[in-house]
Amino acid sequence: MLHGTINSCLGKLQQLKYLNMERNFLMGEIAPNLLINLTKLETIHLGVNNLTGTFMLSWLANSSNLVDVVLSHNYNLKIETELVRWTPLFQLVYLNLSNCVINRRSNGVVPTFLSTQLSLSGIDLSHCSLQGRIPPWLFYNLSDFVLLNGNRMDVIDMDGLGENKISMSIPTNFGSIFQFLDYCDMSSNRLYGGIPSLAEATSLEVLDLSSNNLNEEILPTLIGNLSILTSLLLSNNDLTGPMPPFHWNLGSLKHLSLENNRFSGWLSPLLSNSSNLKTLNVRNNHLSGIIPDGLLSFQQLGVILLGGNDFHGPIPLDLCFNNYLHFVDLSNNQFSGEIPNCFYNDFWTDLPMYFNDDPFSGNITERMSVDFTTKGENLTYMGEPLVLMTGIDLSMNQLSGAIPPPLGFLRQLKSLNLSHNQLVGPIPETFMYMQDMESLDLSYNHLNGSLPMQLANLSFLCSFNVAYNNLSGEIPFQQQLGTFDESAFEGNDNLCGEIINKNCSSVLHQNQGVFDAIDTSLVFWSYVFGCFALGFWGTVALLIWDEVCRRRLCDLMDALMFKLGWEFVP
């Protein structure tokens, strides 16, 4: 084992190619003239020592054959790359500066000379006090790996790449570069092009590429068999083609978000293989078809967002058996038929803390958000409000039939939107049991009957709309219903009350006048038709029973036909 400082006489060995003094007890500073003249160097290994002072990497600028540099684990060695302007003549293959202090006097930036290195297979800059955003060019030239953990950028999980305005296409060798990557968040940047295959990144658990400009089809080889992938977040891009997953083995998948893209075709039947799915968000795409029974029968499914597509057929009965549901959005589709009459007392009544057992509770769940239309506007829920919110949106479909009374037993439901359908019948009185209801929209249907008085007792109700139905009777002016303006009730000609400034007695007299007119008309026409029937059947009876009258009538008809030029030919 070597002790002491490095002898400056080494600087005279100008033909030296390999310098390996790794894993010793060397200490002290490295003299500049030690390395400047070693222009033939190919490898320099000084790692795992106790070297101190400042090491200017520009000292090696003229070593044109240099391919391998290891200075790692010199905890008090300060490596500077930005203090002077320099251009290296070398093309490194491997660089390891881990557990040193890099660019302390330059705010800890990633060494910019790396942008000139086109042959790099691996970089280890872990635990180097780096900070700031990661430069996009760092991903271009690597063919193997980059280690940046233990810095203020926290990029071993690549969680620090989000919202950095990175404008680039994702390198085609991304999967091979980051084979051991487990968390990749490059959301809210300016990434463009397609998504390369990540099949080699077998450690990947979270992939978040949402809110970029990605605009190609998803390759069937994108994921492959990433059996431990839990979150695939690709929303807010311009991706096209069939909806993933294809033949992927995603048994661990929990969160799938493909919202606001241009995926087409059917809902992937292979979703049934993802039995641990908690979030399914394919809203605002071009998906179509009928949702097969059993496809959404995941016991842990808590968020189903299918709105803004072209799905048709009946509402999936699977929704009746998901006890973890927080959000259901099937709005703006072509669903038809009746609302399933299967929402029983044990459905959505005592909600478990659905989000709390997620292994990424410190990452995905805390930053996860759900956009949901309620109270007449599109709101974003995240954090604690997301955990506590519940809602169903079936609006803008072709649903028919009556509103099933069991809906009223969803005691913890906070938002219900059934507007713009073809629903008929009365508003169920069971709605009185939805004590947590904050937003109820039943507008633009064909509902009739009166408003249940019990709705006034929904003390949390702050948004209410039954406009453009066929409701009648007096609008209760008590408690919550008395707080809404007349726009919530317009388009119901037979409603009355103080809220819409229509006197109920005048409506009653008006209706009575209509009923009287109907009665008078009915009596008159009953008399007319009665007289006609009596005369007609009386004449028929006379012709049958009186032979003389019958003969005279026949002679009269023969004479009339002769005058008209008609002739009976037997």
Image: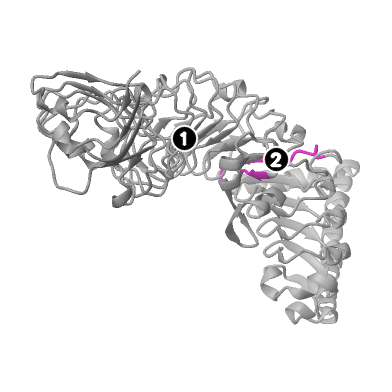
Rendered residue at 42%/45% (across/down) = 162
Residues in magenta, as a range: 327-343
> Which is nearer the N-term, disc 1 or disc 2?
1
Q: Residues within 10 Å of mark 1 (few under 14, many from 20)?
A: many
Rendered residue at 38%/41% (across/down) = 238
In this rendering, would 281 be left or right of 207?
A: right
Residue 526 image position (x, y, % from top left): 85, 62
Q: Amino acid type of disc 2?
A: Asn
Foreground mark, 1 or 2, reads: 1
Residue 49 image position (x, y, % from top left): 36, 28
Rendered residue at 76%/78% (across/down) = 499
Mark drawn on residue 157: 1
* Secondary structure under the numbered disc 2 in the rendered image: helix
Say if the magenta span includes residue 329: yes
Quadrant of the image for the C terminus? top right
In this rendering, would 496 be left or right of 297?
A: right
Mark drawn on residue 295: none
* Secondary structure under the numbered disc 1 in the rendered image: loop
Residue 242 image position (x, y, % from top left): 43, 28
Quadrant of the image for the N terminus? top left
Q: Vertical placement of 406 versus 357: above or below?
A: below
Residue 90 image position (x, y, % from top left): 14, 29
Q: Amino acid type of disc 1?
A: Asp
Location of residue 97 (image quadrant): top left
Give me the C-alpha separation between circle 1 and circle 2: 22 Å
Q: Nearer the viewer, residue 346 or 519?
A: 346
Q: Vertical placement of 177 versus 239: above or below?
A: above
In this rendering, would 415 be left or right of 363?
A: right
The residue singled out by tag 2 in the image is: 356
Is residue 251 visible from the viewing direction of this image? yes
